Image: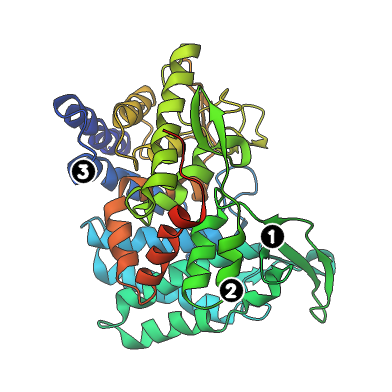
Amino acid sequence: MSLNWQFLKWMSVFIVGAIFVVSTENLSGRVTDAAGPSVYAALKTLRSPAASHGFAVDNTGPGGRTYTKPTNIGLDLLSTLAAVERGQEDPFHAREHVRRVAAVLAKLRTYKGLFPEYIKLAADGAFADTDNGRLRVSSVDSAWLHFALSVAEAYYKKTDPLLARKLGDMVRAADYTVFVREGNTRFRHGMTLSSEDDTVLEEWPFNYDNKNSEARLLVVFLTAIGKVPETVWREMTYTYTQAAGLPVAEGWAMSAFVELAANSYFDEGRLASRTLGRSHANYVAASQRIAAERGYKVFGWAPCYSPEDQYKEYGLQNPDVATPYAAALLTTVDAPGASQNFYKLVQSLASPAGPAPFPDAVDPRTGQVLNRRALSLDQNLLYHALAKDTLRNLVSRTEWAREASRLISRVDEWHRPLPN
């Protein structure tokens, strides 16, 4: 009975293929609605069974369910809200999940309102990791969670004002100025503190100084809500390089993660068409060219676990291993071929063992699984890419969305347009 039920859930994903065949250029809700229920059902298996918190775990590998990071918790909250909007989650169950998560977060140890990078998960609760007398605080990990809390605050503002206020209070308490450096022009990766008295033991050596990075969305968010000065966003660089003969924005490993993750929450191609928009379109085209040149069956490259079970950076510069969430991110761009590629990838992973989360690593030559470990980060980003219209709508309901859109649009003013 269980095997048949799991097979039926996978079949709901295969229905996507029929839609793609009928309308290969359709990147609208008809495509993503077919895949969404199974993807979201798999996401829920990545939540800790501990009734006390229900936090999203980090990954399905050895020890991966014993800890998590703020990013995982935040992305899971966003997935929950999107699933309600798409009819894939019961509103009551979703609200109870958000309430439980918020209650535990409110008691979690923080530093100036900033969440710890690592959070231990136990049956009786969730706790900041202070092993070896140290507490690590990552700027972007904390910001992902505050981003989600702010979106959730806006979502529940009318229907549950008390919950909304609790969510918003955690955002208002955060002091991100501790990461601002070099005359308000740079945003630090993070720092390590003494767990005894919060003394700063080490400042991490790097800054987020490139707009084509994971930090793009988060610096825009923090600027829009007044947590960091606009000079940080303005002074972040945005330069171009060549990939498969096409100009694209330069970013770490040239991965789909740095190029396209933010596109699930804002229509960057519309807001900054001469820079972000052109780069996104060229990125998809470059991915297709590289795949064609190498004889790949599927494509989409971003950081994931390797066949050797090591977390590695993959991208246009190192396209040896594909990952499903990168293929999904490509579909956030209205470009020919991205949807068909995602369908082919899903089809190659057909298995009666679903609705387990997608494996993290796939052989681009054959579509076969190279590493079955699944990460909450990657699975949620995959779902957000498929549900991009819903996520963009959720973000648009916040008080800061208009200012964030203005900041994104200024990329076209501040930086040289992408060459045609």
Q: CA distance from mark 1 to mark 3?
A: 36 Å
Q: Position of residue 17 (x, y in %)?
A: 23, 28
Q: Secondary structure at mark 2?
A: loop
Q: CA distance from mark 2 to mark 1?
A: 14 Å
> Decide: marks 2, 3 in contact (CB < 8 A)?
no
Which residue corresponds to mark 2? 228
Of residue 119 and residue 230, the one placed in the foreground of this image is 230
Question: Mark 2 or mark 3: which comes first in sequence?
Answer: 3
Question: Mark 1 or mark 3: which comes first in sequence?
Answer: 3
Q: Secondary structure at mark 1?
A: loop
Residue 207, above or below 343: below
Q: Residues within 10 Å of mark 2 (few under 14, many from 20)?
A: many
Q: Could you tell me which quadrant the N terminus lies in?
A: top left
Residue 113, above or below 266: below
Which label lies toward us, 2 or 3? Answer: 2
Q: Residue at x 52, y 83 (%)?
A: 172
Label drawn at residue 189: 1
Q: Secondary structure at mark 3?
A: loop
Q: Is residue 110 visible?
A: no
Q: Residues within 10 Å of mark 3 (few under 14, many from 20)?
A: some
Question: Mark 2 or mark 1: which comes first in sequence?
Answer: 1
Which residue corresponds to mark 3? 28
- Quarter-of-image position of residue 60: top right
